[in-house]
Structure formats: C-alpha cells, structure tokens
Image (cartoon, grey):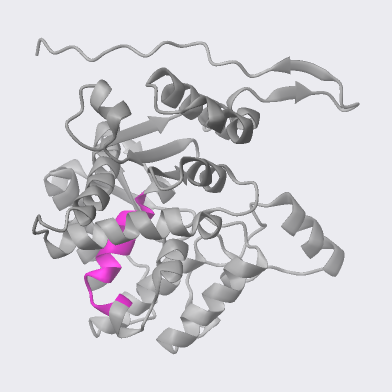
Amino acid sequence: MTLIRSTAKPVQALAVIETGGFSQFKFDDADLALMCASHSSEEQHIARTVNMLAKVQAKEEDLRCGGHSALSDSVNRGWIKRDYNPTAVCNNCSGKHVGMLAGAKAIGADMATYHLSTHPLQSRVKRVFRELCALESEDVKWGIDGCNLPAPAIPLHCLGRLYAIIAASADHQMKTEVPTSARTQELGRIFHAMTQYPELVGGDGRFCTVLMQAFHGRLIGKLGADGCYGIGIRASEQTAQLGATGAVGISLKIEDGNIAILYSAILEILEQLGIRSPEMRKDLDAFHRPAITNTAGVVTGQITPAFKLQAPSLEH
C-alpha cells in the first residue's frame, strides 16, 4: 500500500472534469496542466492560478491549501530578498485546488468545505479512483495530503495501472475510426495537456518538466511527495518489444522518500527497458547519475543505480 500523494492529481483532475466545472468555467488545456501540477511557484504558475480563480469567480481566501516555500531554490531566493510571505496562490498544488473549487461550484456543493473527505466532490474523486483502479472501497485507503486534500493509498501496482490507462487513452484519441468513451477522451486530454505544457506541471529545470520535454509527447511523468512517481508511456515499437500490447505504466516508490534517488532510479528503469534513447541523455544525465560535491565544490562521488530489472514471472 502506497500513499501516492501528488501522483493522484491527473485522476483528481478527471473527477473535476466530470462535474462539468471544467467546461462551465471555460478552463483550457494550460489550466488543466496546472491542475495536474506540483509547480515551482514561478510567476507563470501564480499568474495562471489567479486567472483560474477569476474564471470561477472565487478569491484566494477560498483556497484551503495555505502557502509554503517554493520548490524552486531561485524562486525562494527572490522571495527572501523581497521579504515576501507566500500565500495560497503560491502553493505548488494551487491549480488542483482551484479545480476543486470549480468542481464544487458546478455540482452546487458548498465551496468552503471542498477539501473535506466527506464533501460531495471528494466522494466523486473517491469513486473515480475506485473505478480506474478496479478496486473495492475497502481496498483504497485515504489520508490527508500536505496541501490539505484527501490523498489515496493504493497498492503500488495500481498506480502503474492508472498511468497506463491515461497513456492508452491518448493512443485511443489518435484512432479516429475507433469510438471512445467520454472518460477515455478526457483522460487523453489530460495526457496531452501535461505533455503540451510540461513547464506548468513542474517548472524550470524540474525533473517532471525536463522528462516530458525530452520525450516529446511519448510519456507523462508525475512526482508525488516522499519519493513516489507515476509514468504513462504511449504504445510504440519499444513498448511492443517489452511484450506489451498497448501503453505501459510504471509506478515507483522510494521507501525513505529520497527524491534524488527516485529520479536516478526512474531513468535507470527507462534505460533498462529500452525506452530512453541515447539522444535524450544530454538533458537527463544530471538526474540519472548526479555528481556528489562537498562544500568546496569538489566532486566526492556519484549516485549510481545498482539494480537490474527482472522479467515478470508468467507462471502464476
């Protein structure tokens, strides 16, 4: 069982879309990318959050996420120089929270309590998770995330399943001759929003952003706090060589929450699976085998993945 934290955001965004709030308040795909984001609190992220609030006719005071230091060191340094105290629009989950406000308003539910586990909108979120994971209610546990919203805990393989479904939905969207359900269309839209606006999902130099930029629409990747990650890879020649008949999902959790180790492991997995091509190494190597330096800037070591993937057993 894994508390999947912010890797849940694409599914939470789907639940909001299915309320009708996304279309009602005229959100666009860039807004959708921000709803799936754990962003760096850059100006582009804050400005879009403010714009989304205006579309919903809501105020910053309506957000229940609170403010915190930015995930970006450069943004934090700027705030310190200005003696700036970050507020709720600066929260890395601000896009998701505005989406929740829109969803609550669309179904006529109380906006002030949208963050509570018993709220009608959160009941919809829980149902969507159960359906996509193919789990019963008792098999999905719920906690409270760092941003003050309910967060699901599911078997780790189910996270890979979720991301495979999202990537497969993007593939189905490209097959105009094959009829698709409304949910499949919306999941495909989420995939394309994240790959079209990767800078909104993370930020300048952030792993999620650099990863999706390097793969040019072939995959989505999303970080969850404390070392959790989900990847959805569209069907390709490389995935077929793995024996997959369609899209591939990957889920990963580092037990002690070490993010640098998480990123290194992800890239090693993609390389061992033959998904990561040599031309992508320039942009991603700093995450794959990062140097370790001391306080004088001297390189004292390097993070090196030391595992080999095993093929799954087909006996059972």
Q: Report whether 237 appears left or right of 136.
A: right
Q: Name the image quarter holding residue 275.
A: top left
Q: Nearest the camera: 41 or 193?
A: 193
Residue at image position (9%, 55%) is 178
Q: Magenta includes 18?
A: yes
Q: Magenta includes 96?
A: no
Q: Residue furthest right?
A: 296
Q: Quadrant of the C terminus?
A: top left
* Percent of width and height locating residue 97: 43, 69
The image shows residue 14, relative to residue 23, as above or below, that is: above
Q: Report whether 176 appears left or right of 79.
A: left
Q: Name the image quarter holding residue 19.
A: bottom left
Q: Nearest the camera: 267 or 316?
A: 267
* Percent of width and height locating residue 96: 42, 65
Q: Name the image quarter holding residue 69.
A: bottom right
* Percent of width and height locating residue 105: 31, 83
Residue at image position (18%, 11%) is 313
Whether residue 118 is visible: no
The image shows residue 300, relative to residue 237, as above or below, that is: above
Whether residue 218 is visible: yes
Q: Which residues are magenta?
A: 8-22
Q: Residue furthest bottom?
A: 57
In the rendered picture of this protein, how many numbered marks are placed on residues? 0
Secondary structure, magenta segment, majority class: helix
Residue at image position (21%, 64%) is 123
Q: Nearest the camera: 227 or 215?
A: 215
Q: Quadrant of the N terminus?
A: top left
Residue at image position (24%, 38%) is 247
